[in-house]
Amino acid sequence: MSGDADDREKAPGAGRRYGAALPVAVFAALAVLLYLALFWGDPSDIPSALKDKPVPEFALPAIEGADRLPGLQTADLKTGVPTLVNVWGSWCAPCRKEHPVLMQLAARADVRLVGINYKDAPDNARRFLGTLGNPFEAVGADRTGRTAIDWGVYGVPETFIVDGAGIIRYKHVGPISPADVENVILPELEKARTPAAPAP
């Protein structure tokens, strides 16, 4: 009889212990999933909701004071040839790391490269291009970040491949490496040159 009473007295405390342990267990499970995603997943392999859809309607002015470097708008991406659209900022360390690769891409006759300058001060953006070189045919100044949001940008740098009809065909998250150029970017550009069915 006394054993039953002891069990009844212990039960509420046991429930509280399990209740307190549940959030810890959930947090631990999420931490494990994040770890696996970071170390076994490909961080550049983040699907874009805009893949195979037209580029958003936008019109960005040129970087203030950047002579002979025009701004960028939707119509500039419907030229009949594929275009790499690189979203960058002078304050972004990975963008600086990626820049020599962009310069090499821009030197190729078969690559058209434009930029969206994200949440940057004009002086800093001009200094960045003046110091490291300008790989872009045009750069739109997205001072508020509104256009980048419309493109579904998570963070800079990000690079999109847009086909000649203005349809987004590929999205690369993070800095482009030389290996990415050979293994991903150039093959995806080649695919974007192939006529595709119109976007829905």
Image (cartoon, helix red, strand yellow):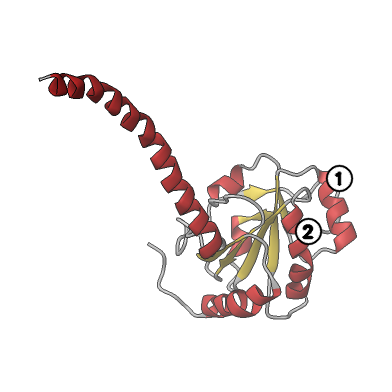
- Mark toward the viewer: 1 or 2: 2
Residue furthest toward the front?
2
Residue 31 spot, x, y in % from top left = 48, 47
At 25% from the left edge and 23% from the top edge, which residue is drawn?
Answer: 10
Q: How many marks?
A: 2
Q: Is residue 5 above or below residue 158?
A: above
Q: Is residue 127 above or below residue 77?
A: above
Residue furthest toward the left?
1
Q: Residues within 10 Å of mark 1 (few under 14, many from 20)?
A: few
Residue matched to label 2? 96
Residue 132 spot, x, y in % from top left = 86, 62
Q: Marks 1 and 2: CB-CB under 8 Å?
A: no
> What type is the residue that disc 2 sits on?
Arg
In-image side of 158 versus 61 (left or right): left
Mark positioned earlier in the residue sequence (1 or 2): 2
Q: Residues within 10 Å of mark 2 (few under 14, many from 20)?
A: some
Q: Which mark is on residue 48?
A: none
Residue matched to label 1? 123
> What type is the residue that disc 1 sits on?
Asp
SS category of the residue bearing label 2:
helix
Quadrant assignment for the N terminus:
top left
Residue 75 visible in image: yes
At 50% from the left edge and 80% from the top edge, which residue is drawn?
Answer: 194
Residue 144 spot, x, y in % from top left = 66, 39
